[in-house]
Amino acid sequence: MKPVACLLLLSGFFIVLAALALLQSLGQIAAFVGAGFGVEAFGVALLVQAYRPAAKEQR
Amino acid sequence: MNPALCLFAILLVPFASAGLALIHQGLGRSRSAAHAMLGTLCALSVSAIVFVLFGSSWAGFTGAATHTFTAGGAHWDWLGAAPFFARGAGFDGTDAAGLERALPLCLEMFAAGLVATVPLSAGADRWRLAPICLSSALLAGIAYPLFTHWVWGGGWLAQLGANFGIAGFTDAGGAGAIQVVGGLAALSVAWIAGPRRGKFADDGMAAAIPGHNIVMVLFGCILALVGWTGLDSAASILFYGAGPQQVAGVAINAMLSAAGGCLAALAVTRSRYHKPDASLSANGWIAGLVAGSASCAMVSPVAAIFIGVIAGVLTTYTIEVFELHLRVDDPGGAVSVHALSGIWGLIALGIYGNFPGGTRAGHVLAQWVGICALIGFMLPLIHAGNLLLNRLSRFRVDDDGHRHGMDVRELGAGAYPEFVIHSDEFVPR
């Protein structure tokens, strides 16, 4: 799950970069930046979830 | 630019690291206090050497050679290409333009140390010295210079306005380049090192492990204010052309943000627990400084107070969320204080900042692009680097270290050798 989460983080970032490179309108760029941020938030949530079971162990 | 004022401000920056060091050791256990302070010295030492020798090349400076590529009809300046080993920094005084290279190098070196100091808070009581040094090298050599170049070295984030017609990403005092990068590194360290022994019970309940010296924590807050004032002022002068009058505004805004954060945290804890919580109020103070540093020279005093208040409230609640719900053991609250408050500060700058040009929507969008770069690129970069380093040198101390404390395990002696518990016959009557 951790590699997938890291890939999601990078995917969100590249969505933002692609929007900057390919789109002209401020509204369109804003929509894709929002989408990229959403993908990143999903990646962070996955990372958090991936590390939670390890925290349950009595260490 | 006023070089004397700038140099004076730069020389205050180490006080920020000193303040954070006192906060870290005070919020940790007494049996790891010396280790916490030595860890800070190690982080500062490694980060200074690595940044000056290598990182400064990639951080670059405006006007220096850079690595660029072209995509979508725009030039993407993604990495500095200044000479390694700080060659050409103009220390000998023969080059008239050398001062403009030497001053940013000096500021960025101290700031690299601050970045490396932040994660120590999350790894308190269990993060070993060797991986502290390795992780500091990763931050000062790769992660911090990369983002610094993007923001302060004329990189693609700074040129968003010129290349893509929105507005340039702005970070006047390093809330993104220093605090969020350090806070994300803290999150990575907390994940990799795992919780302290006994922090979480089998049923998931978190045990309270109070800091051992709250007086040091509160003194560290005052020391940090001095350092933050210098950091915000120097960065505003060097990278955003602030004059002496604006520097006075920077100092006022830094104090107001810290005050707003501290009083907000104090009020929240007072209303929730019936008594103000000193450690959370200290975290609110630092959160106010962190959030305020993004916009230090660019907002009104009223906005600075508001930014600090929101940062203080946000920190108080998110520390609890991280500990109780996400089960992240972060003894100093570094993730909330530095990463989340830094992100809030960057957003607030877009909303309340007084910019000389560009639309409000364009500035808000540019700030979000920068935040996406921090979360989407810097977090996986730092975390992947830390995972590799953890294979090289295990972050987490062994069980003996947890039982005896980091001081005895790693340094061979405690911080307070005369502080022993006496039995009744030694108690004076």
Image (cartoon, coloured by chain):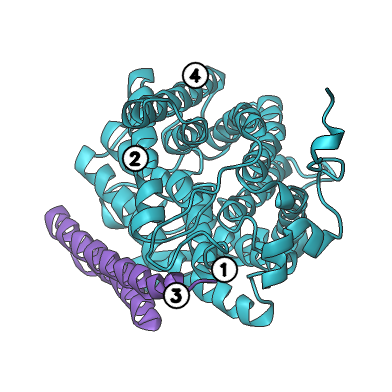
Chain colours: A purple, B cyan
Q: Which residue is mark 1?
A: B193
Q: Give the CA separation, mark 1 to mark 2.
A: 25 Å
Q: State the image coordinates of residue B182 (x, y, percent, origin top left).
A: 53, 54
Q: Is residue A14 left or right of residue B144?
A: left
Tag of residue A54: 3
Q: Which residue in the structure is indicated by mark 4?
A: B252
Q: Earlier in the sequence, mark 1 or mark 2?
A: 1
Q: Nearer the viewer, residue B322 or B248?
A: B322
Expressed as whole percent of the image width and height from the top left, the position of residue B173 reads: 50, 38
Say which residue appears at 37% left-offset and 71% top-offset. A47
Callout 2 crowding tier (Cα within 10 Å): few <14, some 14–19, many ≥20: many
Query: Element under label 4?
Result: helix
Say what secondary structure mark 3 lies in. Answer: helix
Q: Residue at x 71, y 56 (%)?
A: B43
Distance Cα–Cα, label 4 vs label 1:
38 Å
Q: Which of pointers 4 and 1 indicates the residue nearer the eye?
A: 1
- The image's mark for residue B351 is none
Between the residue at mark 4 and the residue at mark 3, the CA separation in whole angstroms equals 45 Å
> Which is in the foreground here, disc 1 or disc 2?
1
Name the disc covering residue B314, or none. 2
Question: Label 2 is found on which chain of the structure?
Answer: B
The quadrant of the rendering that contains the C terminus of chain B is top right
Label 1: state its secondary structure.
helix
Among the 4 quarters of the image, the one containing residue B271? top left
